[in-house]
Image (tube, rainbow, N blue to C red):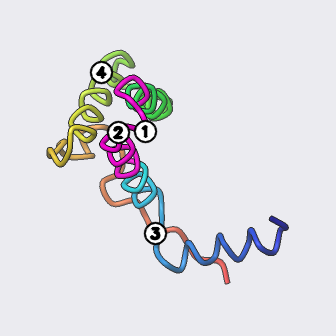
Amino acid sequence: MDYSEEQRLHDSVGFVGLRAQATAVGLLQLSLELRRAGVIDEEAINRIKEAIAKDISLSCPRSQPKREFLSNIRSRLDRLFAGGTPVGDASMMGAPVNPPPVAERH
């Protein structure tokens, strides 16, 4: 894909409203569908969850012990991947509840 195609795709995704949360929901649904279809096993799901948890743990607030933060993330991911269980308030994770909108480029 050349730059202009990449830019058009980027802009199109932005115009539709896809952001990190939408991407995460898509990844979660894709993972559940692949597991349900028998394409990937529980170990693959666990590797996906661990990769997500490790990346999120990089944003651990200094005021919170990293081990506790990572444990909390893993627990919440387990509940998400189990399907539809509420995982709590994002403000408890030290992340902004309502981050400012990303400015669109025209």
Q: Which mark, by number, is residue 101? A: 3
Sort mark 3 into few (<14), some (14-19) or many (20+) by Cα contacts within 10 Å. Answer: few
Q: Which mark, by number, is residue 35? A: 2
Q: Earlier in the sequence, mark 1 or mark 3?
A: 1
Q: In the displayed structure, does residue 50 sit left or right of residue 103?
A: left
Q: Which mark, by number, is residue 48? A: none
Q: Which mark, by number, is residue 39? A: 1
Q: Using the image as rendered, state which of residue 100 and residue 80 is in the foreground.
A: 80
Q: Which type of secondary structure does the marked residue at label 2 adopt?
A: helix
Comparing marks 1 and 3, which lies closer to the viewer? 1
Q: In the displayed structure, does residue 102 sit left or right of residue 3?
A: left
Q: Earlier in the sequence, mark 3 or mark 2?
A: 2
Q: Which type of secondary structure does the marked residue at label 4 adopt?
A: helix
Q: Which type of secondary structure does the marked residue at label 3 adopt?
A: loop
Q: Are marks 2 and 1 in contact (CB under 8 Å)?
A: yes
Q: Disc 3 and disc 2: Cα gap in Å?
A: 33 Å
Comparing marks 4 and 2, which lies closer to the viewer? 2
Comparing marks 3 and 2, which lies closer to the viewer? 2
Q: Which residues are magenta?
A: 28-44
17 lies above or below 44: below
Q: Earlier in the sequence, mark 4 or mark 2?
A: 2
Residue type pointed to by label 4: Ser
Where residue 32 sits: x, y (%)? Answer: 32, 45
Q: Which image quarter: residue 41? A: top left
Magenta region includes residue 41: yes
Q: Are marks 1 and 4 in contact (CB under 8 Å)?
A: no
Residue type pointed to by label 3: Pro
Q: Disc 1 and disc 4: Cα gap in Å?
A: 28 Å
Where residue 73 sits: x, y (%)? Answer: 32, 30
Sort mark 4 into few (<14), some (14-19) or many (20+) by Cα contacts within 10 Å. Answer: few
